[in-house]
Image (cartoon, rainbow, N blue to C red):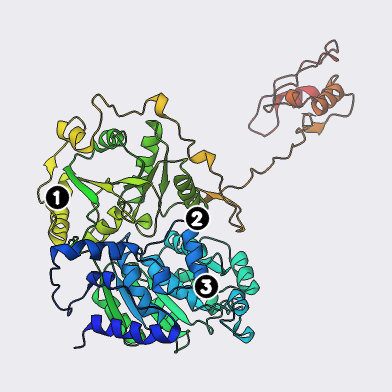
Amino acid sequence: MRDPLARCMRLSETTGSRAGRPAPSQGATGTWRGKHDPPRRRAPRHTEEAITLSAITTTFRDLGILAETAEALEAVGIITPFPIQEMTLPVALAGCDVIGQAKTGTGKTLGFGLPLLETVTVPADVEAGRARPEQLTDAPQALVVVPTRELCQQVTNDLLTAGKVRNVRVLSIYGGRAYEPQVEALNRGVDVVVGTPGRLLDLAGQRKLDLSEVRCLVLDEADEMLDLGFLPDVEKIIERLPAKRQTMLFSATMPGQVIGLARRYMNQPTHISATAPDDDGATVANTTQHVFRAHSMDKPEMLARMLQAEGRGLVMVFCRTKRTAADVAEQLGRRGFAAAAVHGDLGQGAREQALRAFRNGKVDVLVCTDVAARGIDVDGVTHVINYQTPEDEKTYLHRIGRTGRAGATGIAVTLVDWDDIPRWQLINKALGLAFPDPVETYSTSAHLFEALRIPEGTRGTLPRAERTRAGLDAEEVEDLGGPGGRRRGGRESRPEPQRQARAPRQRRRTRGGATLAEGEGGAQAPAASAAADEPAVAVAAEGAAPAATEEHAGTPRTPRRRRRRTRGGQSAGAAGAEG
């Protein structure tokens, strides 16, 4: 079998000289690791510093991306690539199919995003002389398929940032929003489409989405699409694409079915697996992990005290069920914390409202299910707390991957209930962690305060002096343009229907079955007019006399006789009146 390292280097050398792109720096070769790579030789002590310095000074410009793209990245402080980016760019820029595998939070989005943006032809390329005017089109030229709506927004924002100088048009398409704005944006013309499988297949089936001009396809988090059952939809989308295209598949894990998908739809892909030299485990080394055995009834108190630890920034709390996530967010709100929930029972508007509030700092605790375990890249997340044990090791990796991203440090805490000990032991064994038997812990345990640096005397309620966040209500709910208007909590908030005032009921008095004429019976006519002017004076029960108003208080009234029913159906009072 060919050596993948030699193949990648050969591809970058042959295509780099032809396209004017330099070969990857020699300092980055230490991060190329594959199953069939030659054993890494330990460098002499006097050369280790030089190799490290060379790896640090490698920039995106050195990897051969367009100057406009490098300028857009430098404007937001992104200069030095991560290993997966440095290894992927030379191969992907050459037009080869790529399978990229790296730990979550190591920069996979730009690893496929930068080559994808360079396959797109925009007016800026025509002005710079890199393309001809007839190459311009309003149909999408690149497609990114992602499993969740939150990841769709995240990838769209990153691509918009990288393509800002070239003015690349990027559109996100996912469910929960109205069709009309997305169709209108497609009609105006887009260059890159990022979407979830269901909505993409729906619009393509209605011929609203033209996929005939797609030159580059990216499948991001393919293992998650497999778990969610999206793989058949992904295959239907791929069948609509041109046969001649570049395909890139990126994920943190590679199950067998994902590898089978790559073999069917990719052309001699290069499998790149990036790991740091000093990080051989499955988890990121910058994340400090703590595992405690906790009782379910004591978890809210433990969580409230952990949220008051020293140096705590933004926090994500993960739950297994939607009901638990909503209940935990409500309890934290009663304890004084600025918390918001994100789960599947919420409408799309409420989910995006909570995420915006979390990114903007109005809410510092986000309680969510695994729907937010992928694609949420928020600066300042210092703690991830697994309120409930995850289902498997992949879910655990993606949960704790929300902190310790892009070289930052983070803390991951897992609360294991007594019933979840067997599940946790399987996760611990699969990942090779050092917590086979978590220590029994309560909200008053001294080792909990010491491990998480919780100040002594901390209680389960946030002091009023520290309640400085604006809260979820300070973030407006976006109008998604649907027929039901804005949504909050999964239900449409429609205006209350206005009740029309009804005319008071007017009743006719009878005597012996015969209707009394006007003026007959004394007070009948004044009482009827008073009932029309004063609704409150209406007769409430049958047989009750109408109350007299102040205007007719002095009018004499004929006393009413009490009628008695007889067996023959004729009242005794009526018979007496006739006699």
Residue 536: give x, y in percent of width and height: 73, 24
Per the image, the residue denoted by label 3 is 192
Tags 1 and 2 touching, CB below 8 Å: no
Q: Quadrant of the N terminus?
A: bottom left
Report whether residue 457 is seen.
yes
- The amino acid pointed to by label 2 is Gln
Is 151 left, or right, of 521 in this rendering? left
- Where 113 sits versus 472, above or below? below
Q: Is residue 260 above or below residue 334?
A: below
Disc 2: which residue:
348
Callout 1 secondary element: helix
Residue sitting at x 68%, y 26%? 540
Classify 10 Å Cα crowding around label 1: few (below 14), some (14-19), many (20 and above).
some
**Disc 2 on helix, strand or loop?**
helix
Q: CA distance from mark 1 to mark 3?
A: 45 Å
Which residue lies under the disc numbered 1?
A: 421
Residue found at x 73% / y 40%: 500
**Is residue 59 left or right of 6 when viewed as pictured?**
right
Mark nearest the camera among 1 and 3 is: 3
Task: Tell me which numbered mark, 2 or 3, is placed earlier along the sequence.
Answer: 3
Pointer 1 or 2: first along the chain: 2
- The amino acid sitting under disc 1 is Ile
Furthest-front residue in this view: 46
Using the numbered discs, state the Cα–Cα distance from disc 2 to disc 3 in whole angstroms: 23 Å
